Image (cartoon, rainbow, N blue to C red):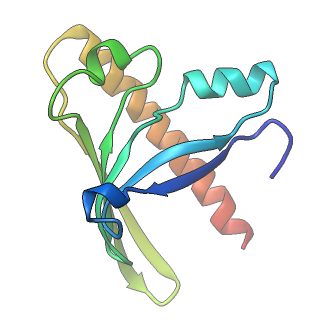
Amino acid sequence: MGEGRPLIGTERREETGESDRKRNLFVIKYGETKKQKQALCHSTYGCKVLSFDRPYYINIEWRGNAEQKSFMNNVRPLTNVTIIFSQLAATKTKVTLLHTGWRQDENWEAARQYFIKAWTGAFQQLETIVNKI
């Protein structure tokens, strides 16, 4: 991994009795650079994988970043992200992302707009990586 990039991992949630189904997403290493500290502030630390059925879908309880945590991370239920993988051909997969659970006020609408841009950027990065393979 390149300099200044966080390493992301998962932690088994053994105490839940569902270690194969629930995982806690977390950052396992950050350096001391300003860029890395900023990345941590913009992370969605604490998101939890609620369920998955490889290779069809993954469902995640989603948290807001530093700017959104005061309202996004203190409600129940949290927002929810479901990513569905549909094989269209031997070398072609459709990826559908549903991010639900938005509330009705201007902070929530700003957060929703933020995540629309963030997910768009994430898919653009994924497309770049996949096209290099």
Residue beneath the point at 31% across and 56% down: 15
| Residue 53 image point, x, y percent | 30, 74
Q: Name the residue furthest bottom.
A: 90
**In the picture provided, is 103 more to the left or to the right than 96?**
left
Residue 133 higher or lower than 79, as above or below: below
Q: Which is nearer the eye, 111 or 36?
A: 36
Residue beneath the point at 52% across and 51% down: 123
Figure disc tally: 0
Residue beneath the point at 57% across and 53% down: 9
Q: Name the residue furthest top.
A: 106
**In the picture provided, is 20 more to the left or to the right than 30?**
left
Residue beneath the point at 33% across and 12% down: 70
Residue 110 higher or lower than 86, as above or below: above
Q: Which is nearer the eye, 30 or 97?
A: 30
* Figure quadrant of residue 14: bottom left
| Residue 33 image point, x, y percent | 82, 24
Please state, as top left, top right, bottom left or bottom right, where the C terminus lies in the image: bottom right
Residue 67 higher or lower than 90, as above or below: above
**In the picture provided, is 18 more to the left or to the right than 90?**
left
